[in-house]
Amino acid sequence: MAVLTIPAEAKATPEQTRAWCAQLEAGDILYFPQSPVPLSADDASFLLGQQQTDSSLHKNIAYKPNVNRLSGFDARTANPAAVERLHQVMRRYSQSVVAFLTGFLAPYQARWQLDYASFRPQEEQGRDLPLRRRNDLLHTDAFPTRPTHGARILRFFNNIHPARTRDWVVSDPFAEMVRQFAPRQIAPQAGNALSRAGKAAACAVGLGAAIPSLKRSPYDDFMMRFHNFLKENPQWQAECPKYAFQFPPGSSWMVYTDTVPHAVLAGQYALEQTFLVRPEAMVRPEVSPLRVLEEIAQTQLA
Ligand code: SIN
Ligand code: FE
């Protein structure tokens, strides 16, 4: 895996935008030392001031662009003017990221579903969260309530802290990493002493037959289980290859977080916009988790 630095003067030619998509899909992080979607000084100081002035805006704030709604604050105690301002800032941020990526990732031709944006005002170091919600353990992303049916999770981040880096650790991407686990480790239904054929079948069963929730595909069930499996696996957490990166104040980065195992160890105040990119938009479908898993399972999963 690699962190590719995108200089401010990089030109979005057709070949270049295709190469960026391919690099992202293969598990690289694209890093912008100066964010291409900077916040105005006013908006930034408003966001940084929230912690002090309004404790009901402390939490992770979500903005849903498709319905233009803000959530994650305590409506009973929040100051309505601050909520309104926050809503506007998040809306503008979301729109600027979309406008930027529409050109920068032109091969996708906006064949994405716009997912939530978030404001992350909390200090990440030492957060006390239940294990499956901890983000300081390496994991690949999957959403318990928002199945993607094979669409990929692309996330764009801004570190808006005025002085501190946001400290990540990442590991090798899904297509390389998933094959190190025996099907029985990641597919709970599989037995232990299996023949090769039995393993393939058990894998298919494990991937395909976990009681699907109403709208989740077998693919979504697998990705959710895999997220939990990685966080609950101390040996893998300790032994997997790790690459540390500190994103400086004012920078942006983007990455397919469904396939690049990532953890945030420290940092405060980030903005983020998530996109669900459809399988047919991929420029390298062969490394997509859907294809990789379908090849292992020898069956259709979404
Ligand atoms: C995560 O997606 O695990 C958290 C990343 C971050 O907030 O920096
Ligand atoms: Fe994550």
Image (cartoon, helix red, strand yellow):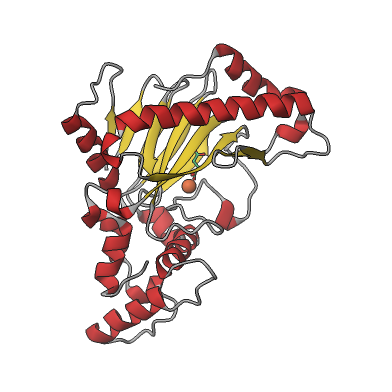
Q: Residue at x 20, y 36 (%)?
A: 19
Quarter of the image where the C terminus is located: bottom left
- Residue 87, image quadrant: top right
* Residue lying at the far top of the rendered structure: 41
Relative placement, left or right, of 181 versus 15 is right
Quarter of the image where the N terminus is located: top left
Relative placement, left or right, of 189 versus 72 is left
Q: Position of residue 163 (x, y in %)?
A: 52, 18
Q: Residue at x 42, y 53 (%)?
A: 140
Q: Position of residue 229 (x, y in %)?
A: 46, 64
- Residue 43, image quadrant: top right
Q: Residue at x 47, y 21 (%)?
A: 249
- Residue 22, image quadrant: top left
* Residue lying at the far right of the rendered structure: 76
Q: Up-down: is 45 above or below 264? A: above
Q: Up-down: is 35 above or below 202? A: above
Residue 269 in sight from this viewpoint: no
Relative placement, left or right, of 269 versus 150 is right
Q: Residue at x 68, y 41 (%)?
A: 72
Q: Position of residue 221 (x, y in %)?
A: 46, 67
For the residue pair 109 and 158, the one nearer the viewer reads as 109
Q: Position of residue 105 (x, y in %)?
A: 30, 35
Residue 111 in sight from this viewpoint: yes
Please state the total of marks drawn on the protein image.
0
